[in-house]
Image (cartoon, rainbow, N blue to C red):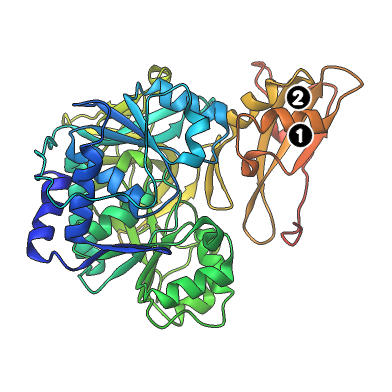
Amino acid sequence: MTIYSRFKELVKNDPDHPAVIDERTCVNYAGLDRLVDTLISRFPSFIPARVGIVMDHSVEMVAAIMAVIKSGAAFVAVEPDFPPGRLTAFLVENGIDFVITQEHYASLLNDFKRLIIGPDVYVDPALHPLPDRSRSDRPAYIMYSSTPDGYPLGVAVGNSQVLHFAESFKLTYNISGDDILLQFSACIINIFIQEVFGALLNGAAVAIPSSATRNDAEKLVKFIDEQYITIVSGFPFLMMELNNLEALPVTVRLLISTGGPLHASSIGRLLEQVPVYNTYGPAEATVSATCYCCNPGLMLPDGTFPIGKAMNGTDVMILDDDLHEVPSGCEGEICLVGDGLADYYTGDHREDVKPFAVIGDGRRVFRTGDWGCQMPDGNYAFLRRKDSEVNILGKKVVTGEVERAMKKSDEVEDCVVVHYIDEQGSAYLVAYVVPRSKSFRLSWVKTRMAQYVPAYMIPEFFVLLKALPTDATGTVNTLALPVVLKDGKAG
């Protein structure tokens, strides 16, 4: 079975059930299926292998995703507000056949063959269903990631892994046709997969707010209320925003936090209203590898919650550097084994990372680079993230990518980017810069960076140094850098 064949079963079983809702329209399962065939009939390549998607989140975007999957290809989705250089590099490195986009983004994609679709796609009632070319052993999508040095990297995930996750998601959270999931996350984040396929492969609906609504807490809550949304997932930053409300909309029945440590202080009000789950899982694990119900739950000494026990058919192991299991309670690297793991990496820098290995019993293991331990009750605790990766405002940032963007400026001789945690538990970036000359202009550096990275990846603070401190091996000694403090209330 593939993603599309599972979706087709649901079309046949309940064709009139709402499938995708946005602020402009709503389409049911049968209508979405017809829209899928309509888009495939317009593909500029007969049998594509990889198709880029650069669109506003909408009914049409979801239809484009399903169309690519039905055609047997893998979709490569990128947010339209990606800096142009970053967007182009990722699409080129993944060898896409063409891009599905909208008229107002077409100029960003002049170097590619394009299928431009509008908000009112005509669905020909006489169009016969097109053949399903999807296969369970082929990738369904390629998710954007980065190497530790900040180079673009694709994570290829297959149809079978997504189906495996959708089934586990259904069993863990009792998903039914009565549920409506909020689609809040960016398409380059694996939570997007949970929001879309956790709904459409389980007979539920997915509701998509506009970008203006997503970026306004008051409008977002109104949207959740008006669309009767039952499940909200997102980064801890979103949970913190919801915790500031006096009360959640009454339709919300559970919250799922993922992508970073969840602090108890961030969800105190929420725990009194609905179940809140803390989950853990990199893109290489499809979506979530573990989950933990926080109410009532055990807090760790640092005020965060455990990441829970294994789900999604993926085993969790805590291993040492030689890939041997450490005793319960001892620290080690969080490693994942099982059917939910990605197939392979794509892109020019795929050989730069070697996180997959084979353990003694012959099983393939993914080394996350994150440190954790197993607690006496069997739950796992996340202790610290790999040095080069951090979440800023609910978005993953690889500090090496920020450094590379900064070095593209003629103003910068050398630099290093470090993240710190403020008093509210939120991360922020500090750049330590060795200027090329005394006439250093920060505004020029930021302008240059904006061509390659989005605004949230530009450090909040810049510190000028005559030289970066190094240790005996010549490596930058981050512990010798002056610490820049932030109280958590600024900006």
Give the x, y percent position of residue 246. 56, 82
Location of the C terminus by quadrant is: bottom right
Q: Tell which of 379 and 177 is nearer to you.
A: 177
In the picture, the disc for residue 481 is 1
- Would you place residue 233 above or below residue 288 in this image? below
Residue 365's spot in the image, x, y percent?
27, 34
Under mark 2, the amino acid is Pro
Query: Which secondary structure lies at badge 1?
Result: loop
Count the marks: how many?
2
Q: Residue at x 34, y 42 (%)?
A: 326
Of the image marks 1 and 2, the number of the one nearer the N terminus: 2
Image side of residue 256 versus residue 413, left or right: left
Image position of 24 with respect to 342: above or below: below
In the current view of this chain or complex, which residue is farthest to the right?
438
Q: Is 274 drawn above or below residue 330 in the view shown? A: below
**Residue 469: which numbered mark, if any?**
2
Characterize the local packing of mark 2: few (<14), some (14-19) or many (20 or more) Cα atoms within 10 angstroms: some
Q: Secondary structure at mark 2?
A: loop
Where 441 falls versus 277 (above or below)? above
Does the CB distance between marks 1 and 2 fall below 8 Å? yes
Q: CA distance from mark 1 to mark 2?
A: 7 Å
Q: Residue at x 44, y 51 (%)?
A: 382
Q: Give the side of residue 98 with respect to residue 209, left or right.
A: left
Image quadrant containing the N terminus? top left
Q: Position of residue 232 (x, y in %)?
A: 40, 66
Q: Residue shown at 13%/43% (left/top)?
A: 2
Q: Residue at coordinates 41% horizontally, 63% vertically from top-left?
A: 24
Say if residue 491 shows up in the picture: yes
**Amino acid beneath label 1:** Leu
User: x, y (%) of residue 163?
Assistant: 18, 49
Question: Relative to 301, is 156 on the left or the right?
Answer: left
Residue 340, by quadrant, is top left
